[in-house]
Image (tube, rainbow, N blue to C red):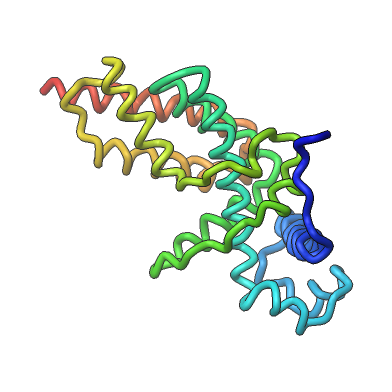
Amino acid sequence: MANTPRFSLRERKFARTRLALAEIVTHHLENAPLDSLSVKVLCERAQISEATFFNYFPRKDDLVAYLDKLWSLELNWYGRQAAAQQQGLTVIEALFRYNAIQVQKKPGLMGEIIAYEARDREHAPRPAITAAERALAFSDLPGIVEFEDESLEVVLRAALQQAIDRGELPANTLQPAAMVGLVSIFTGVPLAIMHSNPANIGPMYRQQLEILWSGLRAVAGA
């Protein structure tokens, strides 16, 4: 294809190595926690030296931050697609629906990401995802190479404001409270049921969002 990005050998090697490490960790997390995987064993599986590993990730935990960034990038891409066709609450619900599908596929990874974010008190910056990594990891998502990544909070806040502007939520909606509710539902529902009943994450998301919308309307009208 004429518009396919061209990357140098060095860029491709860097991308392939980081993504290979990420895939090994993702598979491991479906059966055991990250703490049970040593850097030595990880490097043996990836067929690289430990010195090479630390050239890519200064700490083992940085791999979880990297996986978190990949997860967020893909989720935000789907959020942008939803926003191009819909507005307001529908966009938020589409994001939650897609995340439910991803959690069902990779519950161990989601659990580790939530645990990492709970430990990350200093809000350390996530590793940057290069254009070559985006192209290799998400070859089926058009435009993601040039995609301007934003945090989940930014995407949710924009859709929330749209919902208010469209009259789906009252004009005096307490936006900070709404954002706390959204983030709590986003992480709390998977944390509560992803191992016992992962198939119910989507329906539970819908139920909890309906409760949140009803509560916001009731408080705004009080």
Q: Position of residue 21 (x, y in %)?
A: 76, 64
The C terminus lies in which quarter of the figure? top left
Q: Is residue 209 left or right of residue 219?
A: right
Q: Residue furthest bottom?
A: 51
Rendered view: 152 above or below 94: below
Q: Residue furthest top?
A: 167
Looking at this view, is 191 or 48 the one in front?
Answer: 48
- Residue 98: which quarter of the image? top right
Residue 70 in view, yes or no: yes
Q: Residue furthest front?
A: 2
User: Total marks drawn?
Assistant: 0
- Residue 63: which quarter of the image? bottom right
Q: Residue at x 38, y 38 (%)?
A: 182
Q: Residue at x 65, y 44 (%)?
A: 145
Q: Position of residue 124 (x, y in %)?
A: 46, 67
Rendered view: 21 above or below 50: above
Looking at this view, is 42 or 56 the one in front?
Answer: 56
Residue 28 in view, yes or no: no
Q: Residue at x 62, y 37 (%)?
A: 197
Q: Is residue 21 left or right of residue 156?
A: right
The N terminus lies in which quarter of the figure? top right
Q: Residue at x 52, y 46 (%)?
A: 149
Q: Position of residue 51 (x, y in %)?
A: 76, 84
Q: Position of residue 49 (x, y in %)?
A: 83, 81
Rendered view: 75 above or below 12: above
